[in-house]
Image (cartoon, rainbow, N blue to C red):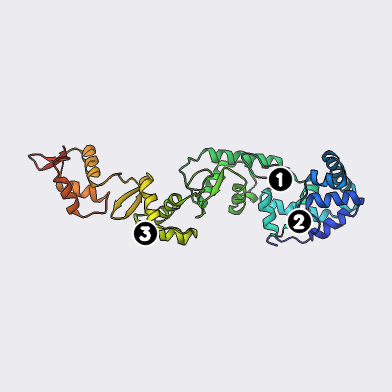
Amino acid sequence: MSATIMFKPKQVVKRLLSVLPDRAKDIITNRYGLGNSPDRLTLEAIGKKYGITRERVRQIENYALANIRKSKEFTKEKKSFDELAGLVHSFGGIVAEQDFLNHISLNDSIQNHMNFLLVLGNEFKRLKEDEEFKHRWYIDEDLAEKIHESLRKLYNSLSDDDIVAESEMVSRFLDQLKDVNDQYRKEEVVKRWLSLSKNLDKNPFGEWGVTHSPNIRTKGMRDYAFLVIRKHGSPIHFREVAKKITELFNKKAHVATTHNELIKDPRFVLVGRGLYALAEWGYMSGVVKDVIRKIIEKNGPLPKDKIIDKVLKERYVKENTILVNLQNPKYFRKDKEGRYANA
């Protein structure tokens, strides 16, 4: 087990189920996957087995849970439930159901038994998955609401293009969170709280953003290429981009395909022979001629050396390439003072 617990879930559940009559015990076993098979049966499937309605199965389930809670066996297991409550507190007081169970064990059967104990425990409250959040369990309602509200504020503060380092995301979340006990203000706890949200997620590099952003939920070669170039931090050849996609994402990236995707996406700017940068870094779009024209539009007529200097900050080309473009009278003209302007 990943998260150490002293009690044995299956033995605790076995003792608790012993207070039930056979049919109720069998229904609970099948409903929660507590038998030889970890599969959980639906109300309809159990109803067909016994020739009763779904509603009748639900009534028997509720009756069985209530009977267990009123039994002496349930009282005897107080120590186990206290330990489980302590574990929930140590995980942040509110936990994503599947994440919590995965931390305890990756065994489906053990997860089912732990889930059943959460259902039985009087102190545990469950909120079903909705548009914003995953299935989750909590103990303190006030804390749960603070976490929910802080996650909403954090999501609303992000744009689709934002990519945030995990340490920065933790810091931003804590800035949104007010009046929470210091025992919870730890990085590991905050990261678990972040995982409650369906609107926030991490990309393969562990960077956070809004879930629907292509920078977070990568869907194709263009998105993988964007993350590769961004991580590289400077212009990179398309062959190296394809190589990095294969290495970092375990996705076979053909060089020609990668190059075609880079050409078609405005997020990328060709800044040299086969070299691509991100448009968000401020590089001008277009070929060398277009860059020269934009520089002149912004700064007015300029001497040759000034134009060369400014173009070389935008493109990885030889000076002669810039000079050849400047000699084209269709696009540029030279005044009496030796300055170049757009034709």
Q: Earlier in the sequence, mark 1 or mark 2?
A: 2
**Label located before the other in sequence (3 or 2):** 2
Select label 1 or label 2 by which is in front.
2
- Position of the C terminus, as image quadrant, is top left
C-alpha distance separating marks 3 and 2: 48 Å
- In the rendered image, the quadrant that contains the N terminus is bottom right
Depicted 146 relative to depicted 33: above or below: above
Picture residue at 85% right of the left edge, 46% below the top: 65
- For badge 3, the amino acid type reads Arg
- Residue 232 can be seen, yes or no: yes
Mark 1 = which residue? 138
Q: Which residue bears the numbered disc 2?
A: 38
Give 41 or 332, whichever is nearer the viewer. 41
Distance Cα–Cα, label 1 vs label 2: 24 Å
Kind of residue at disc 2: Pro
Labelled disc at residue 239: 3
Q: Is residue 343 left or right of residue 104?
A: left
Distance between the alpha carbons at the discs numbered 3 and 1: 50 Å
Q: Name the mark nearer the viewer: 3 or 1.
A: 3
Asked if disc 1 and disc 2 are in contact, CB closer than 8 Å, the reply is no
* Residue 90 is at least partly visible in this image: no
